[in-house]
Structures are given as C-alpha cells and as structure tokens.
Amino acid sequence: MPKSPNWNNPLRNSNNRIVTIGGGTGAPIVIKAFILAGFSNISAISTATDSGGRTGRMRTDERDRIISVGDLLRNLLALISPAQNHLSRVKAFTELADFTDGRYRNLGYQIYYGLLEKYHNNFLAVQKHFEQLLDIRFQGVAIPVTIKPTNISFSTSIGAVYHGEHELDRQSMSANTITKIWLDEPVPATPEAISAISQATLIIFCPGSIYGSVIVNLLPKGITAALKASKAKKILITNLVSNRNQTHRFSPLDYLRLFKKYTGLPRPFDLLLCPGISEAEFDRKYSRVAKIYATEHSHFLGWAQPELQPLEKLGIKVIRTDAMAITPGLSRIRHDPAKLAPLLKSIIL
C-alpha cells in the first residue's frame, strides 16, 4: 500500500504556499475559505480558454486573439480580504466590475483587457495596478494558466467532436458523455503558473466544471511536468452535483481515473474532500432540491462509506464534510466558505 502523507505535521502559516487550480464559482469559494482561515500566500491558477457567456462574446469580438479573463478576474476579486470588502472604493469597483452593458460586454473584463494591453500581457502588473487603484493588498496572486489564446476541443461517447468551451455548457444536459479533451492549438503555460506549482506546499483541485474549469488547466505545456516534480500535498474537492455529460454517476474511483489520465501521476491527489452524506441521504433530507436538480439531469455527488474505501485502500485520505449550503430562492447547492475555512485550516495545521 502506498505510504499516506502525514497530515498531522504542524506547519507555520508563513511557510504555506497554497495553489488553487480552477475557476467558475468553485475556485473563488475555496480562495475565500483559505483567507477566512488566515492564509494569504495563495496562487490562484485559472483557465484562459472560456468561449461562452460574456467573456466568450468579447473573445469573439476580438476574433479569438485574446485569452479569457473571466475566471482570472473572479479569482482576483476573491483574493480581497473580507476586512477590505467594506472599503468604499472596493465596493464601488466590484459594482463596476459586475456591470454588463446592452451588448453583453462586461465592464470588469473590459477594464482588465485594457490594462493587459497597457502592460503588454503582464498580469502581475495589472494586479499591482488594481492594488494601487483600490489601496489594498490582495491575499495572493491570480495567475492565468496561459497567456496564449487557444480553445478546447472534446470528443464524446457517440464519436462526435466539438470545439469551444461554450459547447460544454450547450451539451451539459446531454447523455453524450465527454471522453477526451484537448487544446486546438498547443500553448505553453505561464512561467508563473509553473513556478507556483513547483514551489507549492499544498495544491487544491477546486470544485467546478471538471473539464472546463479544472482539467483544462492541466493541458498547457509544462503543467504536468511541474505537477510530477512537485512535492506538495494535493487535495481534490469534489463537486456537489453532477453534470450529465461530465460526471454523471461518478464514483470516487472515476475521479481518480480521470485525474491520473490528465496529470500523468499514479496518485494525483493525496486527500479527497467530499460531501458528508450520500446521494440517498441527500435525496431524503432535501427531496425538493433533489427534484429540482433532477429536472436538469443532475444528481447529488455524495457517497456512502463503502464507496470511499477503495481510495482509502490506495492510501488516499478521505474526509467527508457538511461544508455546504443551499441558497434561498433558487435552491442551489454551494460550498460554504465559512464552513470550509476551519476544515482546511485543520487539514493544513
């Protein structure tokens, strides 16, 4: 049996170099949880290939000659300490960043793109500009996995091939399951992403679209080599609900298989963080919410203890947690940063 990592070694906060990999809504929640737990040396790596929604519209307008900055900006805003959120200039900026005009062009993205052009694609200089503008200090750095424009392609169980991340969303309720994903044009990872992974003490694969927000970050050249060379502990936080075309009826071993395939690592994560109740328990306790997700061909991604034992036998630590919340009104299930924070702190310290 592979030797399990020692999660009980006390580490001083200042020595922790945390890397999050992901985007969408999942990564910002994880970032906020780390900040609530008292950590600040966070490198938030996000994809740059989104071709859907507001950022997709802007990429289309620019004939795909720019990267996507949607996940990058969301991660950057998540790096603002809660102690600074109340500042008037921070609140004013986040309101501007959320504004979308009649052409579906987001003002926050436009500002970020303008600064990227001003600083010749130096996203660190862009972040520094925001710090000076807002008179704050971010609790880490937001890093695009690449600054070279490219798009994803993927094949499916019926042998079809689709181009562009917007097709992931379009096919999200389809039984046409994704079988492989790749980049249309091979691109190098940013040196900052490679350096962050190489120097990390902890790497978190965040919840989110498993292909569109997480796996896609493993595709630029240099990332898998950095992961193989890294001595960091690695944690996977699983999604709370499935996507029909990506994680339908996924088991813990399916997650392991998928990450082994795209990282090239025999054990791509040392710890799995998953819901504290099984799908059957969730359906009984939250039947109305389960029925809403069922109309979208989604289901709760929770497992009973016997389903988790195969990972534990491989030396992978499994932690089941109730660090989730159900939003009022829309009844969506989300990880709760306030609940996740003490758990992450206990794991690291």
Image (spheres, grey):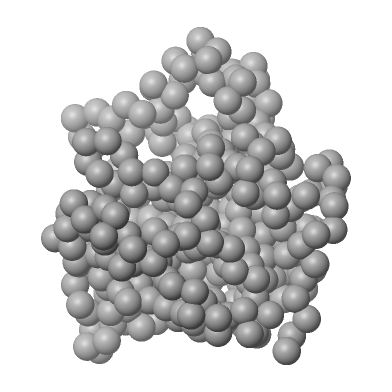
Is 127 situated left or right of 277 in this image? right
Residue 2 placement (x, y as % from top left): 74, 85
Residue 50 placement (x, y as % from top left): 38, 55
- Vertical comparison of 76 with 146: above or below: above
> Taking the image as drawn, is residue 349 in sight?
yes
- Vertical comparison of 1 with 267: above or below: below
> Taking the image as drawn, is residue 186 in sight?
no
Locate the N terminus by quadrant: bottom right
Q: Residue at x 61, y 58 (%)?
A: 204
Q: Residue at x 62, y 49 (%)?
A: 343
Where residue 331 sits, quadrant-wise, is top left
Residue 255 placement (x, y as % from top left): 48, 76
Residue 170 placement (x, y as % from top left): 21, 63
Is 186 situated left or right of 316 in this image? left
Q: Residue at x 18, y 51 (%)?
A: 288
Where residue 228 sits, quadrant-wise, is bottom right
Q: Residue at x 49, y 68 (%)?
A: 215
Q: Nearer the viewer, residue 292 or 25?
A: 292
- Vertical comparison of 285 with 271: above or below: above
Is 4 situated left or right of 157 in this image? right
- Vertical comparison of 181 with 24: above or below: below
Q: Residue furthest left?
A: 295
Total marks placed? 0
